[in-house]
Image (tube, grey):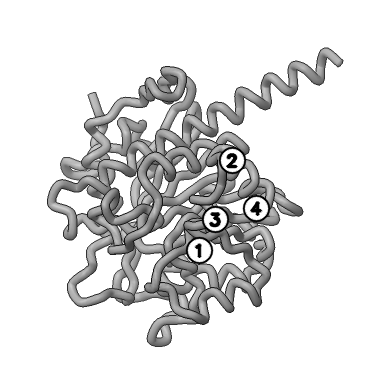
Amino acid sequence: MTETLYGNTPCFLGAKNISATKSFEDIDAVVYGIPWEGAVTWGDYTGCELGPKVMRLTSARYSGYLPELDHIDVFEHMKLGDIGDIDVVPADVDETMRRITKFSSELWKSGKFLIGLGGDHGVTFPIVKALAETGKKVGIIHLDAHYDNLPSHNGDQYARCSPFARLYEQEGVRNESIIHTGIHGPRNMPEAGRNAKEAGAVTVTINDIRNAKDLKQLAVELYAMASKDVDCVYLSICSDVLDFAFNPGGPVDGNGLTSYELLTLVYEICKQGVIGMDFVEIYPQQDPNQNSAHFASTIVLYALAGEIAHKQQKLVTGAHLSRV
């Protein structure tokens, strides 16, 4: 029987409820929610603070079985725990950023594969800040339509258009290993591209992806860039890297990735070895059928399948080296 986290909300993908115990024993990957939306809205296009709840609700329909990936059943290999939501303070941005950093710091100490469900993209900064403060040098693969690197929005330096501006400044994050991937469309501001270039970050546009002959090889190349001269690679995914045809509950951006392209990239990137990930900017109010929230389950399962493949490859490599 699926455990509920609160009310009628189940743990994500049938995970074990560890919100009360905070125990990571026998857990391989930890899910947590960040029900936060800052002040950057357009008219009534809002509501991504509801994303973690609705992604959990829709996840109840899914198993961990992926026949298209060699018939893997993810949960035969990994035990998933759901630790609940970070207690954000809607009226206090600075306090919320502090709480996300503190909560994430405790999670990073566990050494588990972490999966953050947003929330707007502003949450990525305090999550990665907490990771960098553990002493690790961090690279980031950032899958998004937009750079999200503007200095601020109406004075809010932690707005969802600004997390990478803050990460450029963060000690412990190597700017040259920040790979802005899938960038496209006129909702980017001209200065965003300049900001990335000045910071030393790498831009991979939607056309670069489309012109690549092999998505799997592209994923290897992205990881090679992100992992250069760092200790770990973090994966951050905004839903609007998808074309709006595949993402009715996300920001309205055309000319984006297909669901197949995103899943392939996520799986192949995670096969190389990432330390954790987030998936942000699902707006349930815009999506009566909750298609985008449903798709989050598949994205996370593909990431976990990639993590399993990575661990298995390490075992094979280790066994080979022991025989040499």
How much space separates mark 1 and mark 3, taking CA atoms?
Answer: 29 Å
Q: Residue at x 52, y 81 (%)?
A: 191
Q: Nearer the viewer, residue 314 or 158?
A: 314
Labels 4 and 1 touching (C-beta < 8 A): no
Residue identifier under label 1? 126
Would you place residue 117 above or below residue 267 in this image? below
- Tag 3's secondary structure? helix
Q: Which mark is residue 208?
A: 3
Residue identifier under label 2? 111
Q: Which mark is residue 263?
A: none
Specify the quadrant that holds the C terminus: top right
10 Å crowding of disc 4: few (<14), some (14-19), many (20+) = many
Asked whether, in this view, residue 219 is left or right of residue 41, the answer is: right
What amino acid does circle 3 point to? Asp
Would you place residue 43 above or below residue 87 in this image? below
How much space separates mark 4 and mark 2, taking CA atoms?
Answer: 20 Å
Q: Which mark is residue 226?
A: 4
Q: Nearer the viewer, residue 76 or 247?
A: 247
